[in-house]
Amino acid sequence: MDQTWTRPYPPGPGRWLVIVWEAVALAFLAWATVRQFELTGHGAKVVACAMAAAWVIGAHRILQMGAYVGAAGLRIHGLVRSRTLNWHDISHVRLHRATHRVGPFEIESGMTVVIDRHDGSTINTELWAKGVDFHARPSLFRAVYQELRTRHLEACTK
């Protein structure tokens, strides 16, 4: 599928907060590594460069995360991997109420968009109502969900 992919929503400002948080955490990890192993000179530079490279790669992936739509399908960019799905391989785009179990307690973590495929498998998207992109913009979350459903229905009726 060689085509143009567009993200049907602007990324939220919370992504930059995550990127800054990760920079601070990696800087602390580099500092602790240098102190723990008493690294000097080239050793300290190697650790600093490795942490900086990890941060640049991670920041780029965080900025690219999300769901992208095209004429022929849906592309989901995650932190580690991306997948491309043809609209005809998708049976349903739906909302899922995500919960986490901690002992006897069930903690609700909000609505997410889930893709059901014709082969019975389910694919989670990066679209989470309480996530960095939609936490303060619930109407945008609903609009993106409707956009995905509309694109899917239009592609399947052709």
Image: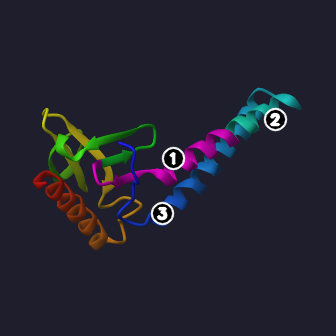
Q: Residues within 10 Å of mark 1 (few under 14, many from 20)?
A: some
Residue at 17%, 44% in the rendered image: 88
Sequence order check, earlier mark of 1 and 3: 3
50 left or right of 120? right
**Colouring mode (rainbow / by chain / secondary structure / one colour):** rainbow
**Residue at image mark 1:** 61
Reading the image, the residue beneath label 3 is: 14
Q: Is residue 56 visible?
A: yes
Q: Which image quarter: residue 158?
A: bottom left
> Identity of the amino acid at label 3?
Gly
Residue name at image x 51 percent, y 46 percent: 61
Report which residue position mark 2 lands on: 45
> What residue range appears in magenta?
52-73
Would you call the spot at circle 2 few (<14 residues within 10 Å), some (14-19), or many (20 or more)? some
Q: Earlier in the sequence, mark 2 or mark 3?
A: 3
Q: Identify the amino acid type marked 1.
A: Arg
